[in-house]
Amino acid sequence: MKPIETTDRANEVKAHPVRTAFTLDKGPGRYRIGLIALASDYVSERDFMNMRPSDEVAVYVSRVLNTNPCTVENLRRMAPKLTDAVSLILPDGRLDAVAYSCTSGTVAIGYEAIAASFHAVRPGIPVATPITAGLAALAGFGARKVAVLTPYVDDVNGPIVRYIEEHGPEVVALTSFLFADDNDMAGIAPEVIYEAAIEADRPEADALFISCTAIRAAEVIERIEQTLGKPVVSANQALCWQALRAAGYREPVPGYGRLLQMPHQPTARQ
């Protein structure tokens, strides 16, 4: 196909106006969620699209630069970049909620700082994060004691456990793959996550929390729950649940554990 010539003749071209009567609708997505994924994230966007209940829910993704290895220091380096990442999502369009897809990053940076970064360009929008969503989910299940499974090294595990215990239930056991690189975390097969979850559980735990949005836990949650006979909350599952509820979607979503079908529906913190 030839390029359009930039000649006087080209400048004289006039299109026929569309004569079909029409009015503009509000665009795609009755419920619109902005998703901030890490540059190295293989999983969050895929999980959100898989858990998306219908075409009424639209997910719009931006990415934020992060640095491996996954340490508290490196996680904090994301903070100055968050506002720019959010600003790239439909800058002149409507969003109903924004989800920041990093559990350890939320703990390292702080929920309030993340929300303030997003509100700089999206004032007042509900902000969902994996750790706050996970704690809301565990509270909804009435969990007072939890077992925790992570992929992190202990530099990151320590703040995660402290955050959970300061804002929610007692952690009765911590089990980890002890990886420092997001690429390794993404390489943990769902079947391995299933086996590790069974290993991580404890009889005294009311629920199991699987931390980190970089691992493929969501697709095996129902199997884990069936085996353990108790609620299982994963980072991406909880983040999607809270973002959906904050955006106004209220219907149960089958296939991803009890949480997405739970009638108790707290919204994201603002």
Image (cartoon, helix red, strand yellow):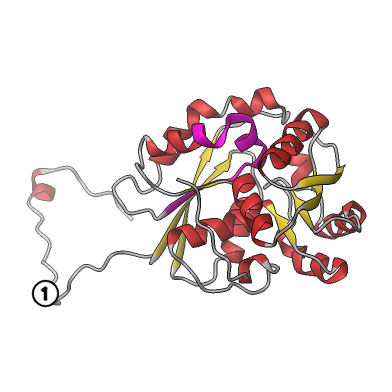
The image quarter in which residue 223 lies: bottom right
Q: Is residue 104 magenta?
A: yes
Q: Residues within 10 Å of mark 1 (few under 14, many from 20)?
A: few
Q: Work out which quarter of the rendered image holds the N terminus and state it.
A: bottom left
Residue that appears at 40% across and 55% down: 96
Q: Is residue 109 magenta?
A: yes
Eyeballing the image, is 270 above or below 266?
above
Report the magenta residues as a range: 97-113
232 and 266: which is toward the camera: 266
Tag 1 secondary structure = loop
Going by the image, does 180 lie left or right of 227?
A: left
Q: Position of residue 80 (x, y in %)?
A: 49, 26
Going by the image, does 25 lie left or right of 59?
A: left
Residue that appears at 58% across and 71% down: 263
264 and 157: which is toward the camera: 264
Eyeballing the image, is 72 above or below 184?
above
Q: Position of residue 2 (x, y in %)?
A: 30, 52
115 and 70: which is toward the camera: 115
Going by the image, does 269 lie left or right of 77?
A: left
The image quarter in which residue 68 lies: top right
Q: Provide the residue designation for mark 1.
A: 19
Residue that appears at 59% across and 45% down: 101
Residue that appears at 50% across and 62% down: 245
Identity, as a three-letter code, of the amino acid under mark 1:
Arg
Q: Position of residue 112 (x, y in %)?
A: 50, 35
